[in-house]
């Protein structure tokens, strides 16, 4: 039977840690509850190690904070007592200071959402607005649970994208390094041999040696040009106009992947906000903030205007021409049946799965294209060297 490590608290706030045998994580949580303690974190030993390694990430800290606070409030502990427990068990010093600051603000008479708002680097506007809606409706524990689901799904999606891009990145770095080594170290040695032997070199070899000598002599100019070009590019896309044009270019190049990604983000965020009790117009404004592509984000402004006029969101979304037809149809059905929040979550789930497939297809196309490009460049270098050797030694081709 699997063994799970756990961290829990008693009703009086005493922290207990240990291991427990159970069929799965849910069974482990139920067994802990039956012993009279409140489980804060239950994970397999490997997961526990991974969580400790990732504590340097603010997003990982936020997810941990949300999960543990949701567990404490669901167990019936008051907010101030729950936050006090979190300050004692927090493993990250910065997050511990943030929680202590929030607890201090609450004890001075501030609301929980206002206390969170003082730390914008940790808690986004979306997070704060959902907490505010939970406070107003008296369902803070439910909203925290929804936030926990939202953060976990967002993290899973980001981790998947990063994981599938690891191999192409390694391929690009190793291939580029191989080409640079050939041009700057290997070829110059051959050029000395060719010069000593004399004779006329083939045109490809002359071109290659000329490029190699130029790169070796003026590598610092090439490197400076690359660095300056990169800085100028980053500065340009930080401007509103540059960011919009760059996002428009990306939309043309990999529009299918970007549309699916932004559709999943937008629908999951909007659905979570509406389900948590946030008004539609405010939810739309918050959901727009999670969209990274400025072309699509600008289109959402027309949706907000349409919603203000009582047109709902399905019609205005159709007019933007940036969301897939299936998503629009599902959102329209959700509006007509009065289950918009549920249908938005289904759209998000559908397009998260579709996005994973689209990313795999893109990577599957990208990998052979990169291998072919590197092969052509390295092949040209090798053939040019062989042509020179054959021409000097008068060997038959």
Image: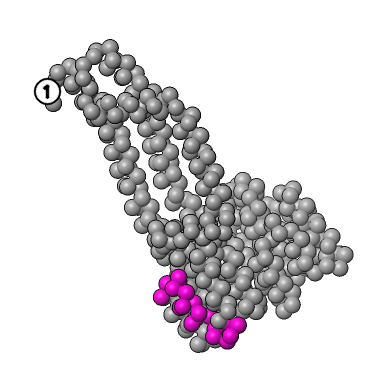
Rendered image coloring scheme: one colour
Q: Position of residue 150 (x, y in %)?
A: 59, 66
- Tell me where residue 70 sits by quadrant: bottom right
> Extreme left residue here?
396
Residue nearest the viewer, comparing 142 with 272: 272
Q: Is residue 123 visible?
A: yes
Does the magenta portion include 233? no
Q: Is residue 123 left or right of residue 216?
A: right
Report the quarter where the N terminus lies: bottom right
Is 374 located above or below residue 78 in the figure? above
Is 174 located above or below residue 326 in the figure? above
Report the quarter where the C terminus lies: top left
Total numbered circles: 1
For numbered disc 1, what is the local secondary structure?
Answer: loop
Q: Position of residue 237 (x, y in %)?
A: 54, 53
Is 279 located above or below residue 219 in the figure? below
Q: Position of residue 29 (x, y in %)?
A: 63, 63
Residue at (44, 58) in percent of width and height: 250
Count neighbours of disc 1 (C-alpha within 10 A) and say few if under 14, some if 14 to 19, many if 20 or more.
Answer: few
Q: Is residue 239 left or right of residue 109?
A: left
Q: Position of residue 346 (x, y in %)?
A: 49, 74
Residue at (47, 74) in percent of width and height: 320
> Extreme right residue here?
108
Q: Is residue 213 left or right of residue 143?
A: left
Residue at (53, 80) in percent of width and height: 313
Residue nearest the viewer, comparing 97 with 249: 249
Is 392 located above or below residue 225 in the figure? above
Q: Where are the magenta residues, as a range?
A: 307-325
Residue at (41, 25) in percent of width and height: 216
Q: Is residue 276 visible?
A: no
Q: Which residue is mark 1?
A: 396
């Amino acid at each position: 039977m699997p063994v799970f490590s756990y961290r829990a608290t008693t009703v009086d706030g005493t922290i207990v840690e240990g291991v427990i045998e159970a069929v799965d994580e849910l069974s482990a949580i139920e067994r802990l509850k039956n012993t009279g303690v409140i489980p804060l974190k239950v994970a397999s030993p490997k997961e526990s190690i991974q969580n400790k390694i990732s504590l340097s990430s603010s997003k990982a800290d936020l997810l941990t904070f949300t999960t543990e606070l949701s567990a404490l409030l669901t167990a019936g502990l008051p907010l101030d007592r729950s936050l006090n427990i979190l300050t004692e068990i927090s493993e990250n010093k910065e997050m511990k200071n943030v929680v202590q600051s929030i607890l201090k603000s609450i004890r001075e008479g501030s609301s929980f959402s206002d206390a969170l708002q003082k730390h914008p680097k940790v808690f986004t506007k979306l997070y704060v607005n959902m907490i505010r809606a939970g406070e107003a409706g008296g369902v803070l524990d439910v909203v925290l649970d929804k936030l926990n689901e939202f953060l976990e799904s967002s993290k899973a999606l980001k981790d998947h994208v990063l994981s599938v891009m690891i191999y192409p990145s390694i391929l690009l770095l190793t291939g580029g390094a191989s080409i640079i080594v050939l041009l700057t170290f290997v070829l110059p040695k051959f050029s000395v041999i060719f010069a000593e032997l004399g004779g006329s070199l083939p045109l490809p070899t002359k071109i290659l040696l000329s490029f190699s000598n130029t790169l070796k002599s003026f590598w610092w100019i090439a490197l400076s040009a690359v660095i300056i070009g990169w800085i100028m590019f980053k500065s340009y896309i930080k401007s509103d106009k540059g960011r919009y044009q760059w996002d428009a270019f990306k939309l043309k190049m990999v529009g299918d992947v970007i549309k699916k990604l932004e559709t999943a983000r937008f629908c999951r965020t909007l659905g979570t906000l509406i389900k948590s009790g946030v008004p539609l117009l405010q939810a739309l404004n918050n959901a727009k903030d999670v969209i990274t592509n400025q072309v699509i984000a600008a289109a959402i402004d027309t949706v907000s205007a349409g919603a203000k006029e009582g047109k709902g969101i399905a019609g205005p979304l159709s007019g933007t021409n940036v969301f897939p037809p299936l998503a629009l149809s599902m959102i329209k059905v959700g509006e007509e049946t009065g289950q918009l929040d549920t249908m938005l979550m289904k759209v998000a789930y559908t397009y998260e799965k579709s996005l994973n497939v689209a990313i795999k297809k893109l990577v599957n196309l990208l990998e052979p294209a990169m291998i072919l490009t590197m092969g052509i460049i390295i092949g040209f270098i090798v053939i040019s060297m062989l042509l020179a050797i054959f021409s000097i030694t008068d060997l038959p081709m």
